[in-house]
Amino acid sequence: MTAHQPKPSRIDWVTLLIYAILVCFGLVCIYASVFKETHPHIWDTSQNYGKQLIWIGVSSIVGLMILVIDEKFFFAFAYFIYGFSIILLIAVLGFGTTVNGSSSWIEIGGFRMQPAEFAKFGTALALAKYLSGYNVNFEKNRKVQIISALLIFTPMLIILLQNETGSTLVFASFIFVLFREGLPGWILLAGFIFIVLSILALLYPPVYLIIGVSILAGIFLLLVRRTRSLVLITIGAVVVAGLFVSSIDYAFQNVLQAHQRSRINVLLGKNVDIKGAGYNVQQSKIAIGSGGLWGKGPLQGTQNKFRFVPEQSTDFIFCTIGEEYGFAGSVAFIGFYVFLLYRLLLMAERQRQKFNRIYGYSVVCILFFHFLINVGMTLGLMPVIGIPLPFISYGGSALLSFTILLFIFIRLDANRVNELRTAFD
Amino acid sequence: MRSGEKQITLLIIFLSVALIYIARLFYLQVIDTSYVYFAQNNVLQEQTIYPARGLIYDRNGELLVYNDAIYDLSVIPEQVKNLDTLAFCNVLNLSKEEFIATFARLRRQKGYSPWRPIVFQRQITIPTYAAFQEKLYDFQGFFVEVRTDRKYKHSNAAHVMGYIGEVSEKQIESSNGYYRMGDFVGQSGVERTYEKVLGGVKGTRYVLVDSKSRTQGRYKNGEFDTAALAGKNIHLTINLKLQQLGEALMKNKIGSIVAIEPSTGEVLSLVSSPTYDPNLLVGRERGNMYMQLLKDPYKPLFNRPISAPYPPGSIFKVIMSLMGQQEGVLTPATSYGCHGGYLFVGCHPHGSPLQLRGAIAVSCNAYFCQVYRSVVNNPKYKHVEDAYQKFYDHAYSFGMGHQLGIDLFGEGPGVLKKSTYFDKIYGRYRWQALTTISMGIGQGELGITPLQMANATAAIANKGYFITPHIVKKIDNKSNPNPSFNKKNWTSVDTGYFQVVIDGMQDVVEHGTAYIARIPNITVCGKTGTAQNPHGKDHSVFFAFAPKENPKIAIAVFVENAGFGATWAAPIASLMIEEYLTGKHETRKYLLDRMLNADLIKRNDSTSAKAK
């Protein structure tokens, strides 16, 4: 067994360092966001930052344990972990504690955790194991595609039943993983077009959009060499787009709940009610906007300190960064985060084993999706969906699950040299 | 798509998102500066620190007005928990309905926030405060705020000091936002004219508040805070003892007393009767009391001595004597006969013919009608209008027909008509002295406030000049706060013409109409007046100064509907002079008692009832 233990030099120290820096910076931000002159003590476990400190300790120990576990463990137990997390998710439906309207929490001895968080890496492991199997060809085999979709949709559905929209949407990030593994690019493109179309459908009456899409299709057909099938596909696409646009309007009015409708309206700038649904976003923009070029300095953010931004230490933690460190700090932070994603992308691509690669891509895509939604939300570019900013936001189970997610990949990555050696042996 | 390309595609997606977000951040944080302003609006709250109002003393340093604590019961609605409503209502003496109604009213108020303190009941009584303080722990969320209100040590000089009250909408507007709703400002008297001095300067404290308006600390350690500047103390020119005697003498009479120190223009006493206790216009009953006083038929709130114009009556003959001499139509030796009157103006029996000094002493109507005629029909001027203008100018130079500029709110100009007024009635060049002859004896189109009369007396005592009467002697122990009150205002009559008039006024008191006003060992110069009044009984008028050489006090007394000047006004003025110069009334105790006890209001009411 000792031969398979990663030597310290094979662990990707850069990623580990980035992780450490982000977690520490997150703690500083949480401290700043709940800071009070009367409770300056950072070890105070009654405050969020104190609790986070404990969770950082717990996460470090768990992370360390992952680094010393045999990497085969994750491959071997992938389905087991996936199954266990599905069971937990179902259990939550029955025995969960309701917090902020979503019944997705399990309470164990004062600490709450969200099984949905653990379902993320469970799904990533299961998907990686399934796709890395022999004779499994995602690109060609329809059956494989369906099973992959089922692996992803099952936890998604249960989480949706828990009324936890944010975590549900995170599973959409697996589309990028599948893209890497052979999902045609046009699906990604089509998905993007549909998102654009749905936003437009909410802003303008469907009739205009159908006319607009038809004109665009006409121009397209004029420009390209027309084959019969291409004409048919284009017409089909226009019909689908028309139906989609019409149904979006219907779904928006009849399927979505009132608070979701108002959130989307706020995002689109349709009715800006800064006391009601728009309050979070307005206050978040004020906090970030008031930071200016250089920020107000650590612990000097008035909007953060005096709780104008709700959910400050969790979902709106980026406000603290924006207000106290300004544009310069925010750009540095975004740059740093994108560097982490880039680093992980490089690491994923250098894996020799399919399992490792697919898992790596899952990690990158999950982190990216959180970043995209969370930061976009505080900037008023994304709808208010309550998902944390990985490694920064307050939240014990979130930090622990992201740590596990990342460290499993670091562990897998550390073994790649061993794989090389075994290949030469 | 090869796998390498796919990797790059993903990287491009990551980078585009990062770039979009950075662009958005650049817009929010660098380009759009409005968020900085919003942020400040969010957290900065301005709190006002109220300065203590200046105290008011009399000329001898006797305290008149001071500040008193009042207690406002405030509440932070959000913090009210487990309130025993019944016990609470009992302490405050409220019914349950009132309690509910009050809360409903607070909730409707502008800017209501359940986390912000709001006044639940203004100015609770001290016993209520004490009872409340005992049970404060049972009434979570409620607390008592201390503010200051005025308190008057003596119940005198109400009209001089005035009162304070909540600012009006108009005052807030004209103050450029300095005053806020609910602030107290002077509404009359010295409180009003010296509002800037007494009121001090409000201070500001900037505090940081959280999203629920709870105070979180000071903004930048108080760097931008301004301290409140306490109001300055004021010493009035009023002599409290003289004022008290004046108010006692005028009790149950309607009228005014104004006493001035001729050499300085300082108002020693300013009595308006009936008066009121200034302590009535203080505290939570202020509004009700004010309405009661307003409804009183004798108008206690009306500041008679500075705003009510009266016909001066015979005392105007003194002014006529002076302007006649100045115009060269009258000399001390000029003598006119009196045949029981002049045209339709009657006269009382006295020796005849008389020279000027004698005519003043016996107050001969015929004589002064002659003087008026010779002034207004003066052949020196081509038209009567030009000669009348001279009459107007002389009277004006004694301070009549315009506001003197006393530092009190609500001074009236009196009545003194220009020649154009008569032109309008009779036509240009179509009137002359005989048309307006009654003005020669202080009747007709003449109206003079008691202040103007006392001021004219001071001008005579000074032999030709007066100093604008004023009420404030010292501000913050610094004398002469208002240099414009140092100027000698010269009348248009030369000093040389005064002696004979003053001698005549001496005769009035020594052996003339005002014999009753004689004070042992003090030479008083005075003149009685019995002003005919178209609305009822004659007004009793007297003006005087004393001592003759080196005058220390000039006084004018008006008693409405009291009859002869010698009956009421002269003795009151005489007692006032005696009080001021000697402080004793030993030889004339009977007179003092008679004046103090006389109830002219009752007498007039019963006579008018009889007449009906």
Image: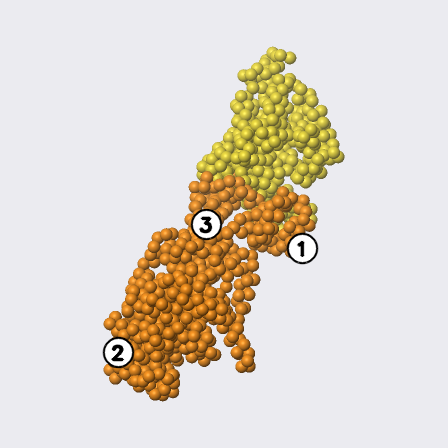
Chain colours: A yellow, B orange
Q: What is the count of numbered marks?
A: 3
Residue B11 in percent (x, y) is at: 54, 32
Q: Nearer the viewer, mark 3 or mark 2?
A: 2
Q: Mark 3 or mark 1: which comes first in sequence?
A: 3
- Where A269 sits versus B543, above or below? above
Residue B220 in percent (x, y) is at: 46, 40
Residue holding disc 3: B51
Amino acid type, mark 1: Ser
Left or right of residue A220, residue B580 in this image: left
Circles 3 and 1: CB atoms closer than 8 Å? no
The residue drawn where x is 48% and y is 52% is B67
The residue lying furthest to the front in this view is B587
The residue drawn where x is 45% and y is 62% is B244
Q: Mark 2 or mark 1: which comes first in sequence?
A: 1
Amino acid type, mark 3: Pro
Mark 2 crowdedness (10 Å alpha carbons): few <14, some 14-19, many ≥20: some
- Where B91 sits versus A48, above or below? below
Query: Mark 1 belongs to which subunit?
Result: B
Mark 3 crowdedness (10 Å alpha carbons): few <14, some 14-19, many ≥20: some
Residue holding disc 1: B95
Q: Secondary structure at mark 3?
A: loop
Residue A329 in percent (x, y) is at: 48, 34
Q: Is residue B361 visible?
A: yes
Query: Mark 2 belongs to which subunit?
Result: B
Relative depth, front residue between B512 and A284: B512
Q: Mark 3 or mark 2: which comes first in sequence?
A: 3
CA distance separating discs 3 and 1: 36 Å
Residue holding disc 2: B332
